[in-house]
């Protein structure tokens, strides 16, 4: 099942996607948004609601919105691919690097990713977003897969000089307009086994990152289990699972995104997230 959040007719909505067709779920179900839909585990009632129905829109008639409008938590993972760990020259730790992204730093598919005036060092990080279904605390590794509601694409746009202002990543990872999320929420059965699924980032059509999801050091299930030991997880929480090698700041010379560029993150069976780079508006 593939879903999305969008705007049409001036209203925020969410819906089911079938090919190019969009079935609005706001008017068919009691759940207000995609986060509520996830919490209610509403797949069965959704199938019944759209069976035999006429689509409300096509994809070219809507404006994509941030997939999960107000998650309780966005937890990001750093250094989760060996090639990225090696290219940074950083030491491997027995536990993953974790940091937080704020919700109001996010943008939707096709929305402009903002290059801030304060920096020229805007970098790309294509990643798999893991969306929590069932919440919980102290989730076992064996049961963690059942807590995954679905997947999406993410570009964890990073302002590198601000990221390196201290040993903490917060300043460089929360600049407004730099966290791209979408376009679709795809349930695990649509994606199937993550092993062998390609994740690729392209800048102006040129491949800058390419890997497969089984190259992650810590799997999505392991991350859910680990994270739940230090914080409770809730339906709709987002885990941004880390980026492969090839990021711009390690290149010689560095490859920074600039106004007018177009960046894409594509993951097999999940989707293609595309954003133009735009100037900051004050």
Image: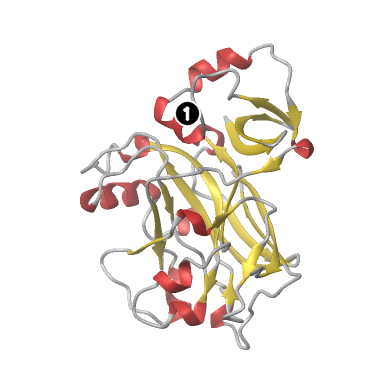
Q: Quadrant of residue 85?
A: bottom left
Query: Where is residue 70 shown, x and y percent of the image?
Result: 46, 44
Tell me the residue at 67%/25% (across/down): 23
Choose between 206 and 198: the one closer to the eye.
206
Drawn side of residue 94 relative to residue 264, left or right: left
- Figure check: 128 above or below 97: above
Q: Quadrant of residue 113?
A: bottom right
Drawn side of residue 145 relative to residue 62, left or right: left
Tell me the residue at 55%/43% (across/down): 67
Crowding near the residue tagged with mark 1, few <14, some 14–19, many ≥20 C-alpha atoms within 10 Å: many
Residue on which the image places disc 1: 37
Tell me the residue at 44%/77% (across/down): 163
Location of the N terminus (image quadrant): top right
Tell me the residue at 71%/35% (across/down): 8
Count of marks, rendered view: 1
- Figure check: 187 above or below 107: above
Query: Where is residue 234 shown, x and y percent of the image?
Result: 33, 40
Choose between 115 and 164: the one closer to the eye.
115
- Figure check: 81 above or below 161: above
Q: Quadrant of residue 51?
A: top right
Q: Residue furthest bottom?
A: 253
Query: Where is residue 177 shown, x and y percent of the image?
Result: 58, 62
**Secondary element type, mark 1:** helix
- Figure check: 133 above or below 265: above
Q: How is the image coloured?
A: secondary structure
Choose between 178 and 248: the one closer to the eye.
178
Location of the C terminus (image quadrant): bottom right
């Amino acid at each position: 099942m593939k879903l999305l959040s969008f705007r049409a007719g001036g209203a925020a909505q969410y819906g089911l996607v079938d090919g190019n067709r969009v079935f609005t779920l706001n008017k068919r179900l009691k759940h207000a948004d995609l986060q509520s839909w996830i919490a209610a585990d509403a797949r069965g009632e959704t199938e019944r609601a759209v069976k035999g129905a006429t689509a409300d829109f096509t994809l070219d008639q809507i404006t994509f919105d941030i997939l999960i409008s107000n998650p309780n938590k966005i937890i990001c993972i750093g250094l989760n691919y060996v090639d990225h760990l090696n290219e940074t020259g950083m030491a491997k730790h027995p536990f993953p690097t974790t940091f937080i992204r704020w919700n109001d730093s996010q943008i939707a598919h096709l929305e402009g990713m903002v290059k801030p005036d304060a920096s020229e060092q805007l970098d790309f990080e294509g990643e798999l977003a893991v969306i929590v279904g069932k919440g919980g605390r102290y989730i076992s590794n064996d049961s963690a897969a059942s807590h995954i509601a679905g997947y999406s694409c993410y570009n964890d746009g990073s302002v590198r000089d601000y990221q390196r202002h201290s040993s903490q990543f917060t300043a460089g990872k929360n600049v407004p307009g730099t966290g791209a999320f979408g376009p679709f929420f795809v349930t695990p059965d649509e994606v199937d086994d993550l092993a062998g699924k390609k994740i690729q980032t392209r800048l102006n059509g040129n491949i800058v990152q390419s890997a497969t999801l089984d190259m992650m050091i810590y799997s999505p299930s392991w991350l859910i289990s680990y994270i739940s030991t230090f914080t409770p997880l809730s339906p709709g929480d987002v885990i941004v699972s880390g980026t492969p090698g090839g990021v711009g700041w390690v290149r010689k010379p560095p490859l920074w995104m600039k106004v007018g560029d177009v960046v894409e993150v594509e993951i097999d069976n999940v989707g293609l997230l595309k954003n133009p780079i735009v100037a900051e508006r004050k």
